[in-house]
Image: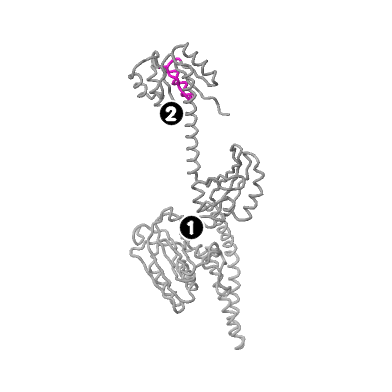
Amino acid sequence: MPSPSIVLVVDDDTLSRQFLQGLLAGESYTVLLASNGAEALRIAAQTPPDLVLLDVIMDGMDGFEVCRRLRSNPELFQVPIVMLTSLEGREAQLRGLEAGADEFLHKPVDPAELLARVRTITRLNRFRQLSDERTRFEAAVAYAPDGIVLTDGEGKILHANNAFVRLVGRTPAGILECFRSETAALLRVQFPTLDRPGRKVDAFETQLAIAATPGAFVEVTVVRLPWSERTILEFILRDVSDQKQLEAQLFRLQRIDLLSHLASGVVRDVDTLMTEIAKSAVELQTTTSSANQKLTAKISENAETASNLLRRILTFAGTSGQRLTPVQIGPVLQETAALTTKLLRSGIKLEIDLANDLPGILADAADLQQVFVNLSLNARDAMPGGGTLRLTAGAVTLTPADAKLIGTDASAGDFLAVSVQDTGTGIAPENRERLFDPFFTTKAPEMATGLGLATVLRVMRRHNGFVGYQTEVGAGTCFTCYFPALSGPGGSE
C-alpha cells in the first residue's frame, strides 16, 4: 500500500491554513503547515513534499521568492508548486511562472477545484518519481559490472544486462543453457525450493558451457525477487576467470618450488654417486679385458648422461648462483644460432633478425644460452617435415593492458623481447595449461625429460622477466622472453 502523498501548505493566514489542512486531511493527505517562507524552506528540506500549496502575498519573504528558492534546491527543484493568489492580471502570473510555479489558483479557492488539482498533480508526481526510480534502476542494472539476468520460475530469460551479454557472447532463451549439464540439472532441482521472495541458492563457482571467452569461470548467485504474484528469479554471474587463473598459477608455483627444494637436495647426492661410478668405470677400463672395457665404457657414458640430467635439474631448481651482470643480447643470440645450426635437421631454415640499438639487460649469459637453445630445440622438434626457425630481438614497451594479455607473470614497462618462432605443428589446446609444468612433455620419454620449458620459466623469473607465447595448431608457435631493459640504447645507465 503506497504511503499518503505529502502536501506542504504555506500561508501566513491562520484561517487559510486551517481550512486547507481540514480539506486535505479529509482526503487522507499528509499535511505539513508553514506560516512563512523561511519555515517553509526548512520543512521542505527536512521532509520533501509531493506538492506545495504556496500563498503569494506573505509578510517578509513572499511566495515568488519562496518558489525561486525551492527551484534552486537540487533536492526540491522537481516538486510541483501551486501558487494561491488574490492578485489579478497577467503580470502576476508571469512573475509566478518565471519563479517556477506550475499552476495558479485564485483566492478564494473552490474546494472541489482545489481537490481535483491536488489529486491530479500528486498522482502525476508519484508517477514521475516511479518513472525516475525505474530509469535509475534500469541504468544500475544495465551498467553493473556483473552479469544480471531476470528469469521466470523455469529459467526463461526475461531480461539480461550488458555485462551478461559480454560474458556469454549471446543471450540464450533460457539461463540453464549457459551452464554445463550437471550444473543445470542441480539448479533445476533447486528451483522449487525458491518458493517465496528472499529464498536463494547460495553462491557457487562453475565453468560456463557457452562463453565469449572459452572456459570462463563464474560465481553464480540465484535469488527470488518480490514481484507481485509472478515468480521472478535473479541470477547474478560474476566473472572469476582471472581469479581462477591466478589460483592455478599459484598452485603451479608452489609445486615448482617444492620440486626445486627436492631437486637441490637429492641431485647433489645422486651426482656424487654418479661421479664415483664414473671413476670406478675408468679404473676398470685400465685393468680388465677388451669385452669388459666396452661394458665399463658404457657405464661411464651412462654415468655422464645421468650427471648431465642432474645438472639440468639443478639449473631448473635455480641453484646456479651466478651474479647477474650487464649483457648484450646480440653475441648471445649469434652463439645460439651457431650452436643450433649444428643440431637442426635438414629442411629447417634458421633466420636471425636483431633490431638496432638493442638495450642491455642484467643476466647470466650461460643461463640465457640454455633458454634459447631449449626453445630452439623445441621448435626444431615441432617441424619434423622442415620449416623456418626465426630468432628475433627488439625493444618493446608494454602497457598494463599488454601485460595482461601475455600472462599473470607479466608487468608493464620497458623490455628487451627475444622471440623464438617456428612454422611447425603448433600446440594442442589441451596441452597449453601444462606447458611449463616440470616433467610434462608430449614427446616420448626417451626423447625428452620435460624440464625444457620449466627451466626456461625458472631462468626468466631469476632474471626478473617473464615469457609469453602464441600458437596455432598447424601454423606454428612463437615463444617470447621479456627481460627488463637497462636504461638507454645499449643498456647505458
Label 1 is placed on what type of residue?
A: Gly
Q: Report if residue 41 lies within the magenta region.
A: yes
Q: Is residue 453 above or below residue 101?
A: below
Task: Give x and y (percent) for residue 46.
Answer: 48, 23
Residue at figure coordinates x 46%, y 13% from the top left: 16
Left or right of residue 85, residue 196 in this image: right
- Residue labelled with disc 2: 78
Label 2 is placed on what type of residue?
A: Gln
Magenta span covers which residues?
35-55
Left or right of residue 329, residue 262 in this image: right
- Residue labelled with disc 1: 407
- Mark 1 lies on a secondary structure that is loop
Residue 48 seen in the current view: no
Q: Residue reaching furthest bottom? A: 290
Q: Quadrant of residue 358?
A: bottom left
Task: Give x and y (percent) for residue 91.
Answer: 32, 19
